[in-house]
Image (spheres, helix red, strand yellow):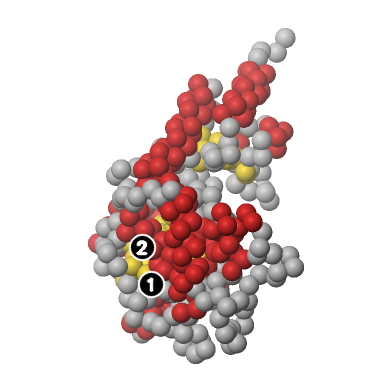
Amino acid sequence: MYWKRHSHDDIKRIVFNALNENSSYDSTNILGLPGTYLDRETFYDDAPFLDDAPFLSTLIANPNHIGCHTLTEQDHEDVFKGTQNIEIDLIRMCAEEIFGGNSQGQDGYVASGGTEANIQALWIYRNYFMKEKNASVDDIAIVYSEDSHYSMPKGANLLNLASIVLSVEENTRKIKLDELSRKIKAAQINGIKHFIVVLNLSTTMFGSVDDISSITEYFVSEELSFKLHIDAAFGGFIYPFTNPENKFNFQNPHINSITIDGHKMLQSPYGTGIFLIRKGYMEYVCTNEAQYVPGKDYTLCGSRSGANAVAVWMILQIHGSEGWKLKMQLLNDKAERLCSKLDALNVFYFRNQHLNIIAIKSSFIPDALAKKYHLVSDSYEHTPKWYKIVIMPHVKQGTLDSFINELQTEINLKTQPCT
């Protein structure tokens, strides 16, 4: 896992060269595209600061990255080939440098977010089973835990697939393996033959990481037909950098696709989810009806902003792998420091040691304190069982100290004997 850090001047030069490689709406005879630069009355392109702002310049140039550009055998819209090449390099970095993929062994694209990327995976595997295994939708089910992101039931609804939702242990957030066996066997009795398994590299609420070894071992030992997708929307840009023993990567032969979100840990603009998948699978969602798109379309969203891909690429390049590793380790250290103070107060919480999410039992947190510090509840329809804190770059140590001091005061008030 290594990529070189680039200076701002290096990044500016590469991005502006890519924009020059794109065709310009101003200087090229473009008559057929249903797109143009951003509205000039609102986003004027002669602002002097744009000479030093490659992302904003790309945003104003408005390149459309419709399609999947890692499919090298396909034609692509050459009007935007410069910034498309930056997206190709971004997908390579994520798939190979962060997630251990083989050289040019993965496809992918910058999606609108983790929700789209997760549904893209479900869509691909549904079609794969239907085409390669002659399955009907009634033969396929999605398997995921109750802590998984809501994009799983949303995808199941959209794709008309059954869901097998696995319970987790209350305090450890581990999937109950006995229930896994029981529910899979019940599904088989009901006619399910193929399984789309989604495991979490950090759940949204708890930061829990599913036990990939035990779960894949079960599906392999039972000789079940399955494809494995990893939802690393939150953990993908931190866990591989804080856990040297990370098993969630393409070196694991069972992992077929991965979702990561740039707009979480990476601090990129919203709309920068990333979908990664092994070569040979994007073809199952080719929209052949997109005849007017060079290379056709393989994505759920269709048209998408090239500027978003440039933004993620720029962030990774300005830090380099060593700089990013340090940044994530510092956040993890701050989370560890908070947990040590919670331990001293005998407050019960859940945290994976490699992640920056701390979920605290609600019985320890007064509602007023949760509201004051904008803690997130596990439910806004029922009485919360947990509140979570996420140690992001904007979270100051002083704010954490103030929270702990107020929490200690509340605990002291509760434990004082009545007089």
Nearer-N-terminus badge (1/2): 1
The amino acid on which the numbered mark 2 sits, given as a three-letter code, is: Arg
- Closer to the camera in the image, 211 or 354: 354
Which residue is disc 2 drawn over? 92
At horizontal 45% and vertical 35% (from top left) the residue drawn is 330
Looking at the picture, how far across and down is residue 61, in whole percent?
A: 59, 69
- Determine whether 377 is above or below 301 in the image: above
Visible residue check, residue 57: yes
At horizontal 40% and vertical 38% (from top left) the residue drawn is 326
Question: Outermost residue toward the right?
Answer: 41
Question: Outermost residue toward the top?
Answer: 419
> Mark 2 falls on what kind of element?
helix
Q: In this view, does 46 lie to the left or right of 180?
A: right
At horizontal 57% and vertical 85% (from top left) the residue drawn is 29
Q: How many labels does the image show?
A: 2
- Closer to the camera in the image, 336 or 319: 319
Looking at the picture, how far across and down is residue 158, in whole percent?
A: 55, 74
Which residue is disc 1 drawn over? 70
- Determine whether 195 is above or below 412 in the image: below
The amino acid on which the numbered mark 1 sits, given as a three-letter code, is: Thr
- Determine whether 126 is above or below 50 in the image: below
Say whether marks 1 and 2 touch (CB < 8 Å).
yes
> Mark 1 falls on what kind of element?
loop
Q: Is residue 158 left or right of residue 247?
A: right
At label 2, counting other C-alpha atoms closer than 10 Å, the crowd grade (few under 14, some 14-19, many 20 or more) is many
- Determine whether 62 is above or below 319 in the image: below
**Disc 1 to disc 2, C-alpha distance:** 9 Å
Looking at the picture, how far across and down is residue 15, in whole percent?
A: 48, 61
